[in-house]
């Protein structure tokens, strides 16, 4: 039941089911991407795993346009062609609000600060266990602010931004 709670499936109103939290995970290591995606799916998340940062940017932009944005992006910091930092910067330039969890075998505090990750609060050093990933994501999403929550009763900041355009 604990994992279902982290994935956003359990509601305070009598245990009614909610839409699972959407996670975009980006890593050029395909074996890691497979196992991390599997662990998150088993925990009840709606997971979209991508090994190409360029395709991940397009996927995130498309999801935002379709009004089905991702709740969180998990990204490796070092990848070929485009780093996780560059990918987050591109998404933020397009006004896409999302939580970010960085993962890497090379943790550099300066890089994490540029990503607004509270200087490492939202970072996991590789290698880590699947339960550590699930637990960290649960904690990040548990602290989700009201402006990022998508509910039927009240518009979030994302709804307001889309209405202005």
Image: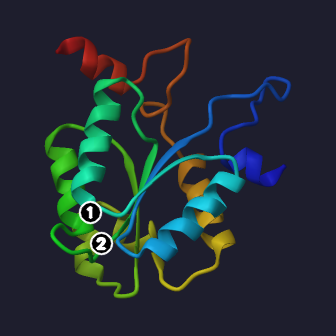
At which x and y percent is residue 112?
29, 72
156 shown above or below 46: above
Asked which secondary structure carries label 2, the reply is helix
Instruction: Locate the C terminus and report the quarter of the image it occupies.
Output: top left
Left or right for 78, reference 2:
left
Determine whether label 1 and label 2 are within 8 Å by CB.
Answer: yes
Looking at the image, which residue is at 14% across and 44% down? 93
Left or right for 32, reference 116:
right
Asked which secondary structure carries label 1, the reply is loop
Dot 2, how many residues are within 10 Å of its Cα: few (below 14), some (14-19), or many (20+)? many
Dot 1, how many residues are within 10 Å of its Cα: few (below 14), some (14-19), or many (20+)? many
Looking at the image, which residue is at 50% across and 74% down? 32
> Could you give the CA–CA distance between mark 1 and mark 2, rounded to whole angstroms?
5 Å
At which x and y percent is residue 30?
44, 72
Q: Which of the labelled discs sits on residue 115, or is there none? A: 1
At which x and y percent is residue 56?
30, 51
Number of marks in the image? 2
Looking at the image, which residue is at 53% across and 86% down? 127
Q: Which of the labelled discs sits on residue 44, or is there none? A: none
Left or right for 110, reference 76:
left
Which sits in the foreground, 14 or 88?
88
Q: Which residue is mark 2?
A: 112
137 shown above or below 66: below
Dividing the picture into quadrants, the one containing residue 157 is top left
At which x and y percent is residue 45?
62, 47
């Amino acid at each position: 039941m604990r994992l279902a709670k982290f994935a956003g499936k359990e509601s305070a109103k009598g245990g009614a089911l909610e839409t699972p939290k959407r996670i975009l995970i980006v890593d050029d290591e395909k074996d890691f991407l497979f196992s991390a995606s599997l662990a998150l799916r088993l925990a009840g998340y709606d997971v979209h795993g991508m090994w190409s940062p360029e395709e991940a940017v397009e996927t995130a932009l498309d999801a935002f346009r379709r009004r089905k944005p991702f709740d969180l992006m998990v990204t490796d910091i070092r990848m070929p062609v485009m780093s996780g930092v560059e990918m987050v910067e591109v998404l933020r330039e397009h006004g896409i609000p999302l939580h970010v969890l960085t993962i890497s075998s090379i943790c550099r505090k300066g890089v994490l600060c540029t990503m607004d990750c509270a200087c490492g609060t939202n970072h996991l050093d590789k290698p880590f266990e699947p339960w550590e990933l699930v637990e960290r994501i649960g904690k990040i999403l548990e602290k989700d602010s009201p402006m990022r929550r998508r509910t039927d009763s009240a518009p979030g900041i994302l709804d307001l931004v889309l209405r202005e355009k």
